[in-house]
Amino acid sequence: MLAKACSVLSVPVVASGASATGRQLAAALAMGAQGITMATRFLATVEAPIHPKIKEHMARDDVDERSTTVVLGALQNATRVFRNDVSETINAITNNSGESISFDQLAPYASGVRTKKMWQETGDFNDAMWSCGQSVGLINDIPTCAALIQRIVREAETQIKSASSCIGSRL
């Protein structure tokens, strides 16, 4: 849809969702976007104000795009989160409740108080529902924000230069 949006809209378009690399920035720019958003990727940076154990977990080799799930869809409030015991419990309750689900049933698991404790105190990634995109599968380090942005720009520039050499100048 990005290519379509860029062809019909007269406002700047920013690609959003599952982006964490310079190659993805280059692809978005090539399709006409003015940039990308990166939420999950910035969680695993030195400056992110979350517990280091969560950052370390996100950067593990066994954490990939399948480490996420969608919750709260039955409440018309679907959101992608990290797959863990809490998100699996939320989905089990939702699936077993049919159409009679209410947020009151899920509130103990989806509580912001619970998530705040995880982010700031315990670092137990398995003990709260927390937003996390599929780009978690592209995270393998915990750089500073400056180093991450420099790397992404450098990688995008390299990718764009490489891609431009694939376009023949002979017609």
Image (cartoon, rainbow, N blue to C red):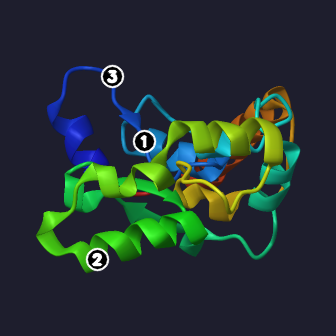
Disc count in the image? 3
3D distance between C-alphas at marks 2 and 3 = 40 Å
Q: For the residue carrying disc 3, how many other residues have a C-alpha within 10 Å: few (<14), some (14-19), or many (20+)? A: few
The residue sitting at 55% across, 64% down in the picture is 86
The residue singled out by tag 3 in the image is 12
Quarter occupied by residue 101: bottom left
Q: Nearer the viewer, residue 87 or 48?
A: 87
Considering depth in this image, is 110 or 7 the residue closer to the camera? Answer: 110
In terms of secondary structure, where does tag 3 sit?
loop
Asked whether the residues under the numbered discs 3 and 1 touch, taking CB atoms below 8 Å apart as contact, a structural biologist would say: no
* Residue at figure coordinates x 44%, y 56% from the top left: 80
What amino acid does circle 2 point to? Asn
Q: Nearer the viewer, residue 79 or 110?
A: 110
Residue 169 visible within the image: no
Closer to the camera: disc 3 or disc 1? 1
Query: Would residue 155 be seen by someone viewing this image from the given angle?
Result: yes
Q: Residue 17, how many percent across, how many down?
A: 45, 48
The amino acid beneath tag 3 is: Pro
For the residue pair 125 and 26, the one nearer the viewer reads as 125
In the drawing, does residue 133 fall left or right of residue 91? Answer: right
Real-space CA distance between mark 3 and mark 1, rounded to the nearest whole angstrom: 13 Å
* Residue that badge 2 annotates: 95
Q: What is the quadrant of residue 117 in the picture?
A: top right
- Is there a contact, CB below 8 Å, between mark 2 and mark 1? no
- Tell me the residue that label 1 is attached to: 16
- The reply to whether the C-beta atoms of the residues labelled 2 and 3 are less than 8 Å apart is no
Give the alpha-carbon distance from disc 2 to disc 1, as whole Å: 29 Å
The location of residue 141, given as percent across then percent down, is 85, 53
Mark 2 or mark 3: name the one nearer the start of the chain: 3
